[in-house]
Amino acid sequence: MVLTIHIDNREISLGVYEGGNQQASSSIGTDLCGTSDQYAAAMQGVLAFHGIQTAYLDGAALSSVVPALTHTLKKAAQRLCGKTPLVVEAGIKTGLNLRLDNLGTVGSDFICNAAAALKRFQPPFVLIQLAGATTFTAIDASGALIGRSILPGVESSLEHLCKSSAQLPDVSFDPKAMLLGRGTGDAIRSGILYGTISMLEGMLARYRGVLGEQAKAIVTGGSLAKTVCRCWSEEAVYQSHLLHQGLYLLYLKNQK
């Protein structure tokens, strides 16, 4: 079995794969002050809750958008599986054609998502990730990653809006928000929901202007991404664990 780990600013998501199939999926909270032992213990407990014994782990693959925690989680993963985990960074085999400047600055989440999406879907397509940030990645008909866009995430935008003004109330994302909000809270919920959908429609149209109208929209992310997909009229393909599938594929590709 292979343990996959992705470190994000809000949570650390975990996956366990065996024979190409996902056996478990879970997460723990991100704590910048956590030690490798604390993280190892937390991951072991969560995996045991899902019936996974770490003694049967053959290896691990790790991606991170929080550099301060990469080494800590690398040590924690090594404690669990007894081997140095694969870290998605410059120098590993990806099999991707990246037509980008400064390849060393390309996030590991982009790499993992693109690797998994190309395994499952025929290009061209637009890969949209709704997480801490909202990102768009263009994959052309040859399978090359030719460009990206990065925008503030839905939740981070909502938090910033509510905290930047003392007169605005704290509200949560509501997939059933009415378009014409009659109160301030409803107005914020309307703006976040329909503003996000309008942004997705507009950006996708622009990307299709480059890739062609046949380019599919593939959306990945957590529960919020799934909710947005349900509210969006576009026939987008939602893939909940695309990043972890990519981690597993990269682990296999880099085995000697």
Image: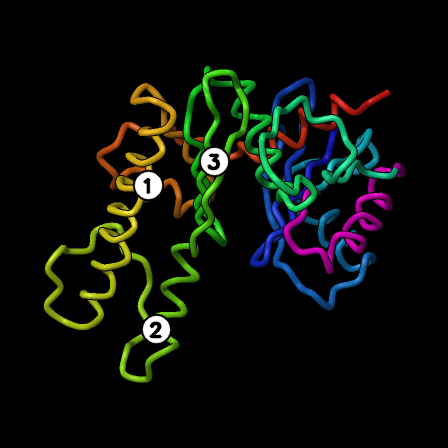
In primary-sequence order, the first of circles 3 and 2 is: 3
Which percent across, then down, holds residue 6? Answer: 64, 44
The relative height of residue 41 versus residue 135 in the rendered view (above or below) is below
Q: Nearer the viewer, residue 63 or 94?
A: 94
Residue most toward the right?
Answer: 82
Magenta stretch: residue 76 in it?
Answer: yes
Q: Are circles 3 and 2 on residues that touch, CB within 8 Å? A: no
Magenta range is 63-83
Crowd around label 3: few <14 · some 14–19 · many ≥20 (10 Å): many
Q: Which residue is mark 1?
A: 203
Looking at marks 2 and 1 on the same chain, the residue that comes earlier in the sequence is marked by 2
Q: Secondary structure at mark 1?
A: helix
**CA gap, disc 1 to disc 3?**
11 Å
Q: Secondary structure at mark 2?
A: helix
Question: What quarter of the picture does the N terminus occupy?
Answer: top right
- Residue 101 in percent (x, y) is at 61, 40
